Amino acid sequence: MSQAHPLPAEISAQLSTLSPTQLAWLSGYCWAQSQGAASSAGVIPAAFASETAASAVARRVTVLSASQTGNARRVAESLHQKLEAAGVSARLVGVADFKSKTLPEEDVLLLITSTQGEGEPPEEAVPLYKFVFGKKSPDLSKLTFAVLGLGDSSYPNFCQAGKDFDSKFAGLGGSRLTDLGVCDLDFQAAADAWIDALVPKVAELFTQASAAPAPMLLLHAQPQQAARFIPKSSLTPPLYPCAKKLPRVMRKKTLNTSKSI
Ligand SMILES: Cc1cc2nc3c(=O)[nH]c(=O)nc-3n(C[C@H](O)[C@H](O)[C@H](O)COP(=O)(O)O)c2cc1C
């Protein structure tokens, strides 16, 4: 084994199969293991700990569909599949099953909506529409969002529901992850293009959230201390969307450890 590359060939080969997100996660885990002596003595430098708390913010992604006859729902399913394929764990929800008042607590919201009537949202999205356009405007300053509208350009109010949600989310303080997409009746190609541009941006949010090695030190080396610095909600499996996709040899220890928290 040389100093320049101290890993066995078997491990190197396995590393080359990992995605950037998985590598970032693993780097934190390994770093934590290498620091075992310091952490078992209970020594966590203050500056390091506060940096950890700031960087250990989990990202939660919701793909929300608002559809009348199924087109927007199918596009949402496709987006969800592509996110999962990119290693991004996301929740897929139809707006009929979504509680509007939880919107301000969403983190990353990706809305696919058609337009019905004369520029109105589909029936199942009316409660959400009323919620954001109501007198008691919610504060969406914690929200990162993207909206894709499906419509028909032969209508005067083309993709109006998508346009309305997009501008309202921004007006209520949300941060737009990508520009509003609009799709005409032959929506497939335009929807695919919008999704293919969006997925790397969402994956990037995950990489940023998991790139810092410090959370791994706290989580794996000292679970009790970790609880002092990381919000409890961040200690759930979705914080590490790629863990289940690690090769088995690397997964075993990780899963056992999170179970003990
Ligand atoms: C009754 C009706 C009204 C519609 N009104 C509009 C409209 O105002 N603006 C628009 O862009 N598209 C309009 N559309 C087109 C739909 O948004 C489009 O067909 C979309 O793909 C439907 O998606 P969905 O199956 O997810 O509801 C309308 C469609 C129907 C059937």
Image (cartoon, grey):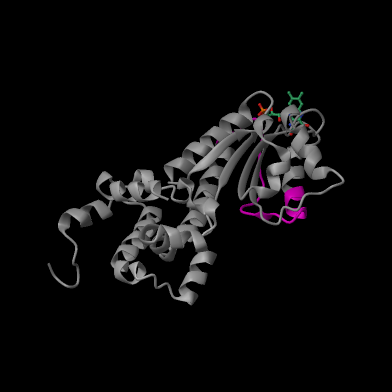
Q: Position of residue 125 (x, y in %)?
A: 73, 33
Name the outermost residue toward the left: 1
Q: Residue drawn at (17%, 53%), measured in percent from left and top?
A: 10
Region of the chain picked out in magenta, as a range: 167-188
Q: Is residue 260 left or right of residue 4?
A: right
Q: In which quadrant of the rendered view does residue 215 lie?
A: bottom left
Query: Image point 72% across, 39% down: which residue?
Result: 100
Please, is residue 255 above or below residue 99 in the view? below
**Which residue lies most toward the right here?**
135
The image position of residue 15, as x and y in percent, is 27, 55
Q: Is residue 179 magenta?
A: yes
Q: In front: 89, or 237?
A: 237
Residue beneath the point at 36% across and 61% down: 221
Residue 31 falls inside the magenta stretch: no
Instruction: List x then y, in percent, for residue 45.
Output: 44, 75
Residue 117 lies in quadrant: top right
Q: Is residue 201 visible?
A: no
Image quarter of the N terminus: bottom left
